[in-house]
Image (spheres, rainbow, N blue to C red):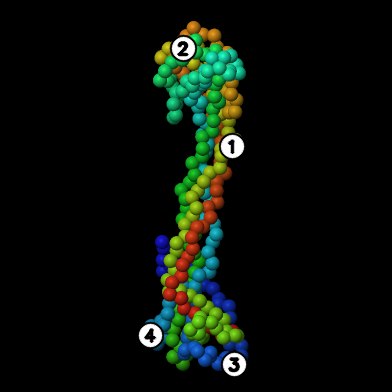
Amino acid sequence: MRKLSLLALSAATLPGCGEWFGPPLDPPLDSGPVLWMWVGPKDEAPPCVDGQPPKWEGWMPQGSPDSCEPCTCGPAACTLPSRVSTNASTCPGGGRSIEFDAGAGWDGTCAMPASPVQPDDFASIAYEPPTLSPCTPSRTPEPPPAPALFVRVCAGNTAQDPPGFVDCMQASKEGTCREGLTRHEFFEELIDERACAPCECGPPAGGKCVANVFLYGDGACGVQVDAARSIRAGDIRCADIDSTLPLVALRAELVEAEPGACAASVPAVIGDVEGREPHVVCSFP
């Protein structure tokens, strides 16, 4: 939650609060004394004349942006295939299947899954291809500042026109202005309860991932049982195996690793800016 108290804002001209172009209108019957109002950046606000304190000070909202700064996504890295599937039938399989898995986060070095696969339990092996990992989104940004102009209202009991101020009247108790006058609403405090939707990344695409996978009959990856070379993303291979050795260990390597990319979301602004302690004044045309 943020309170708007000091904002570096560009000056703006109030519609309908300019120089006199004709005789002044009589004030509304339910209004108080004539007031002087100044609107613009707070650090440029002039003081009330004669050293008198302001009657009111506050903020006039100028709308709110509907989107935050764009998110970004890190690259989609190539990920090694970490497992093969053995099958009791020759390709394309159909018999009892056993997964031979090195585990998540495997770096491709020689690994021994928990249980070896005995020769009588497989007649074929299906090799999984390398994949692209999900992209990592950037940190969710803060919402852009909610534009608002500072308002200073001084009592009108002065004979001189304060430079930069416009003469206005207090609105009715219902907050309305008489026909012919321009209504201006501002708040003593603005509570910014906005946030940006979390950054997200779309599915990875592109890149080029090519891997070699090797299967071994010993724990030191010295006796090779089978191998699949140049497996590309999306390419699932099946190989018939006639081996007297069990599957004990596996090893893999990326021979090409061109990362992919993901589309980043444009986070919308969630929430609103809430105005508290409102005031309404009516300016002459």
Which of pointers 4 and 3 indicates the residue nearer the eye?
3
Label pair 2/4, CB-CB below 8 angstroms: no
Give the CA separation, mark 1 to mark 4: 67 Å
Label pair 2/3, CB-CB below 8 angstroms: no
Which of pointers 2 and 1 indicates the residue nearer the eye?
2
Instruction: Work out whether 142 lies above or below 150.
Output: above
Q: Residue at x 50, y 66 (%)?
A: 147
Q: Earlier in the sequence, mark 2 or mark 3?
A: 3
- Helix, strand or loop under label 3: loop
Give the CA separation, mark 3 to mark 1: 70 Å
Q: Is residue 232 visible?
A: yes
Residue 92 location in percent, x, y?
60, 18
Q: Which mark is residue 118?
A: 2
- 97 or 22, which is in the foreground? 97
Residue 126 is left or right of residue 195, and the answer is right
Q: Residue at x 48, y 84 (%)?
A: 173
Name the residue type under label 2: Gln
Quadrant, the C terminus: bottom right
For label 1, the residue is 205
Residue 131 location in percent, x, y?
54, 30
Give the CA separation, mark 2 to mark 1: 38 Å
- Helix, strand or loop under label 4: helix
For label 3, the residue is 23
Name the residue type under label 1: Ala
Could you tell me how many numbered marks the image carries?
4
Give the CA separation, mark 2 to mark 3: 104 Å
Q: Earlier in the sequence, mark 1 or mark 4?
A: 4
Q: Earlier in the sequence, mark 3 or mark 1?
A: 3
Q: Earlier in the sequence, mark 4 or mark 3?
A: 3
For label 4, the residue is 51
Name the residue type under label 3: Pro
Neighbor class of circle 3 (other Cα within 10 Å; few <14, some 14-19, many 20+) is few
